[in-house]
Image (cartoon, rainbow, N blue to C red):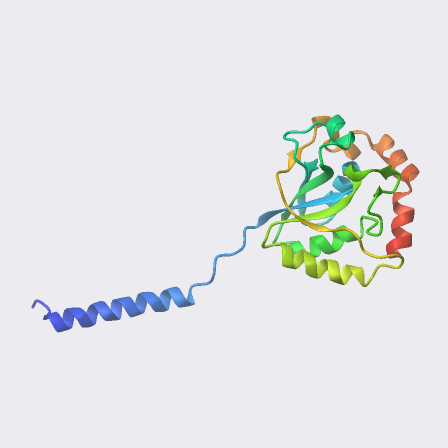
Amino acid sequence: MTPTLPRRLALLSALVLATALVAAVRPAPAAPRLQTAIFAGGCFWCTESDMEHIPGVVSAVSGYTGGTTRNPTYEQVGSERTGHVEAVRVTFDASRISYRQLVDRFWRTIDVTDDGGQFCDRGPNYRTAVFVTPAQRPIAEASRAAAARDVRTGRLLTPIRLATTFWPAEDYHQDFYKKNPLRYRVYRQGCGRDSRLNAVWGR
């Protein structure tokens, strides 16, 4: 028997209601497992090493960001005329470490009280920053406020900046601490990085 018009409308309404109920209880899409973050921590050799030793970090790429020159070279950035800083783009597994946890860890790898460079590396291209997307900004701001309360000496001066184009550095800068372990260790120790971090944050 062919359903009458009222019967058809009732069936259609039931179908629409059932579809709405299924959509309402369906879980929201999970956040992408692999996400990225950009940090400027002075010498990118050190920042890359520090980031890649954090559980949940998949990779870190050294590069330049924050300035106006397209596809800059190391020499151009070092001239202090590009506006870029040395930075690292971090890919991390969000199922193992959250963005907030990653930012929390980043603060402890830099001297947040120094806005003229980092350790023995001086100049604007070695200034620190957390580069964020609009979605990342409130998380980074909350992390910054918490970190500011833990600084043992001075004030937290590292800014949070809107992310712009990230330009990967030359190949010889990538994984420098792995390719040149002795030179890297001598540089890091001679620069006084870890002793200064102990003064700023404690062990």
Which residue is at a point 68% across and 49% down the rendered structure image? Answer: 161
- In this rendering, the count of numbered labels is 0
> Is residue 98 at all visible to an observer of this figure?
no
Which residue is at a point 90% across and 34% down the rendered structure image? Answer: 186
Which residue is at a point 15% across and 69% down the rendered structure image? Answer: 8
Between residues 43 and 178, which one lies in front from this camera angle?
Answer: 43
Instruction: Left or right? Give the position of 17 relative to 77.
Output: left
Furthest residue toward front: 81
Relative to residue 124, is residue 109 depicted above or below?
below
Image coordinates of residue 18 in percent, x first then y, are 31, 68
Relative to residue 61, is residue 106 depicted above or below?
below
Between residues 99 and 115, which one lies in front from this camera angle?
Answer: 115
Relative to residue 29, is residue 192 depicted above or below?
above
Image coordinates of residue 32 in percent, x first then y, are 54, 51
Q: Quadrant of residue 122?
A: top right
Between residues 109 and 78, which one lies in front from this camera angle?
Answer: 78
Image coordinates of residue 185 in percent, x first then y, are 87, 36
Relative to residue 185, is residue 20 depicted above or below?
below
Which quadrant, please, contains the C terminus? bottom right
Furthest residue toward left: 1
Which quadrant, please, contains the N terminus? bottom left
Instruction: Left or right? Give the position of 72 relative to 47.
Output: left
Image coordinates of residue 184 in percent, x first then y, are 84, 34
